Image (cartoon, grey):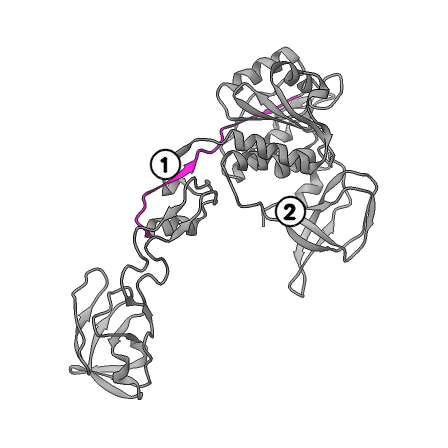
Amino acid sequence: MSTAAFPTRIGFDEAARILDEVAAGARLPVERQPLSRCLGAVLAEDVIATLALPAFDNAAMDGFAVRAQDLAAGQGSLALVGEQFAGLDLARMLAPGQCLRITTGAPLPAGADAVVMKEDTQPVEGDRVRFGRPVRAGQHVRYAAEDVALGDTVLQAGAVLAPAALGLAAALGLPTLPIHRRPTVAVFTTGDELVPAGQVLQPGQIHDSNRVLLQTLLIADGFEPVAWPVLPDDPARITAALRDAAFSFDVIITCGGVSAGEKDHLPALLREAGEVHFWKVRMRPGMPLLAGRLGGAQLLCLPGNPVSVLATYLMLGRRLLDGLQGRRAARPRWQARLAGEFDKRHDRLEFLRGQLQADGDGGLRVLPNPADGSHRLRAVAQSNALIVLPEGPRRFGVGDLVEVVPLGRD
């Protein structure tokens, strides 16, 4: 395949659109999983309520079930005729002038239309309870179906399942949910210079930070990546390892070897052995990003500089993984005021590191980190957001409104 046969040096929005189309055409299959395994997964089908919540009128407080009209005037006493605790409906009924001891969640007896908290009564005297204030109908009562009605669509396909959604599914009696299988991900770093942390460096060598960075980014997003051995700068060995991984994984993500240097073998490899979706995106950092397919796996080749790995994974790698699962909800992007100046002198879309904080007026402000080189990993460690600066050179001043992408550690 020639370089003219696929998009090169494209805009960020075009790269995102291509990845969306690729993911839509390679959507992962649906599987049913127990609720304990669904946290962070993407729901594959709408969930329709097959029962109401609450299923019956019940008490919202411990106290006494009453007829509100018996206490409309305020003070008074009612005959205590029994009790109704949560867990078993005794089918009790209240007549005028009567009350019933009741606990939170217990079925409201027929004839009752309010609950008075125990704290708002005087101690029981014999078989009577004294009340000291007016009561309104509906007080401390949870009505049947006021939360969920039979037939309601309570969860929509494409939603990311958070703890509250899983609690709702359990309340509806669902032990499992249909979710899109999460992608299996293989992680490769490339380069003869890379040495694992903990080993002694020889002249010209560096520790492999990208392996840990990319693995933990994926783990934080709920995936279980498998890191393969570091790939040497040998095209035959790179091809063999990636082809092997393509048989077993949905997605392969590599770091390094993706630009146009003598040791950057991945673009030629993918042209010859697979399919290229695009190569090079007008973004900074991360321009040499390469996306394609090798065998049955989607291949995303990130640049080798660590800040480029972070930016390209968060902004485009995540997008591919989300799309493969049919996720509908967009990742959060906020608006903030710049707390410092920044002089942008290039045409590409910029993802600048910054420190995001709430201001005293209920808004957000973000302080750019001046260390904007793609090798400056310390600047990322000191930041909690990416600042999105649009294409084109421009000087940004204090107070300018910018888009920010939270890094999600706080």
Q: Nearer the viewer, residue 291 or 355?
A: 291
| x and y, in percent, of residue 180 in the image | 44, 35
Q: Quadrant of the N terminus?
A: top right
> Residue at the spot x=17%, y=72% of the render?
93
Q: What's under tag 2, amino acid-wise?
A: Val
Is residue 282 a member of the stretch shown in magenta? Answer: no
**Label ID, residue 405:** 2
Is residue 183 a member of the stretch shown in magenta? Answer: yes
State whether residue 168 is above or below residue 344. below
Occupied quadrant, residue 195? top right
State whether residue 301 is above or below residue 166. above
> Residue at the spot x=36%, y=48% of the render?
48
| x and y, in percent, of residue 210 in the image | 63, 30
| x and y, in percent, of residue 199 in the image | 62, 24
- Measure the C-alpha gap from mark 2 to mark 1: 32 Å
Q: What's under tag 1, amino acid-wise?
A: Arg
Instruction: Identify residue for label 1.
Output: 32
Occupied quadrant, residue 132? bottom left
**Could you tell me which secondary element the residue under label 1 belongs to?**
strand
Question: Is 148 on the left-hand or right-hand side of 199?
Answer: left
State whether residue 25 is above or below residue 381. above
| Few, some or many residues within 10 Å of mark 1 (<14, 14–19, 20+) | some
Question: Is 348 on the left-hand or right-hand side of 230?
Answer: right
Q: Nearer the viewer, residue 231 or 345?
A: 345
Q: Nearer the viewer, residue 365 or 29?
A: 29
Q: What segment is highlighted magenta in the picture?
A: 172-190
